[in-house]
Image: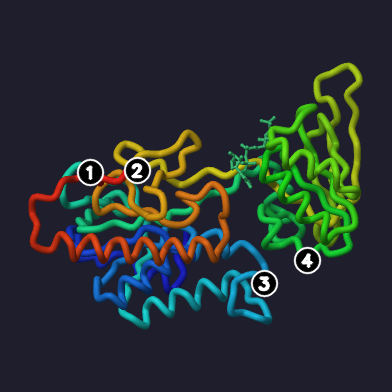
Amino acid sequence: MELTKYETQHKHPDNMNNEHVKCLIIGSGPAGYTAAIYTSRANLKPVLYTGLQMGGQLTTTTEIDNFPGYPAGISGQEMMEELKKQAERFGADIRFGIATAVDFSGKQHKVTIDENRIITADTVIIATGATAKYLGLEAETKYAGQGVSACATCDGFFYKGKDVAVAGGGDTAAEEAVYLAELCNRVYLIVRRNELRASKTMQEKVFATGNIEVLWEHETLDLFGENGVEGAVLIKKRGKPDSETVKINIHGFFLAIGHTPNSGIFKQYVELDDAGYIKTAPGTSKTNIAGVFAAGDVQDPNYRQAVTAAGSGCMAAMDAERYLSLNRNNDNRSNTQTETL
Ligand code: NDP
């Protein structure tokens, strides 16, 4: 992979294979950058590693209209650039690099960057986000940003008055379909089984919304269109004798088949829920490991909004600061938090 000029300039310093920092932030979405703004203002001299996708998931959305403070909207790319600049203004050291392993067994937390450099940190803020699941069709890549989206609240507005489809049958799909139905002419909900996984309440909302058409036992095979998405090819009752191919005309195709929290490298130490989200003590960003905090989508299966991620980044920064000030003269601290997760 070719690095941009910024990424090349901001790689881990070559002469520094081992380094100790007060606060290490992993991830560069709104949670990570907000944590960097707060911790740098609190003089914790944070080092932030961006991960592969600098700026996180928002850099793949077109326009952000629902982040408070931007009355005219702002592109995802631009907003993340602004957040980065804001963090750098207060001295946050933002570096391009990927956390590839961690060791949270001791008092000093060890994080390996790019497989070969070890940073020890008094506090670690995990803000590695989540990755939307895709079906794996070539067309999803071809039409990325041109009709394919994994976030109705981010991109739904661009399909006002048009026909769209949502793939999935869980709470996210149901919620996105209902949200889109307010804006769009017609919403197809493409469900692979003959029932929804979504909660009863969400199912009732779907069924009560006149312009949502549920396509039971349908799966998406392909998307087509000259200038962006103009339709989808579906298969009904795959593998059954009465199976048939169906075409629908749509301008937007929304994936809502789940997210995968990017928590894999932490799972040996940090408690996760059944879906892999990092567990935090209620109302805080504290994980089960003292001095390790989590913010943003990696610990949030429900809201997953830029503004909630930013809010939780602030919480993590304040929790880290308080942790450091409480433990400044206390070398006997335990490695396990006392809060119940
Ligand atoms: P879920 O895992 O609950 O649902 C995923 C849906 O996508 C299922 O219907 C699944 O089908 C379908 N699916 C998965 N893979 C494919 C595929 N390859 N092709 C077609 N369909 C596929 O994910 P959600 O994001 O909906 O929800 C995650 C969690 O967050 C849940 O616990 C949910 O309750 C919660 N949530 C809560 C909300 C709320 O309370 N307001 C809002 C949103 C989420 P199948 O059913 O056949 O497996």
Cα–Cα span, label 3 and label 4: 11 Å
Q: Is mark 4 within 8 Å of ligand 1?
A: no
Q: Are marks 2 and 3 in contact (CB under 8 Å)?
A: no
Q: Amino acid at mark 1?
A: Thr
Residue 65 image position (x, y, % from top left): 67, 72
In the rendered image, which residue does mark 1 sit on? 336
Residue 177 in the figure: left or right of residue 88: right
Residue 19 in the figure: left or right of residue 224: left
Is residue 221 among the parts visible in the rendering?
no
Q: Which mark is residue 266?
A: 2
Q: Secondary structure at mark 2?
A: helix
Q: Nearer the viewer, residue 201 or 239?
A: 201
Which quadrant would residue 340 be assigned to in this image? top left
Is the residue marked by circle 4 packed among few (<14), some (14-19), or many (20+) residues within 10 Å?
some
Badge 2 or badge 3: first in the primary sequence: 3
In the rendered image, which residue does mark 3 sit on? 65
Which quadrant would residue 72 be assigned to in this image? bottom right
Q: Nearer the viewer, residue 132 or 196?
A: 196
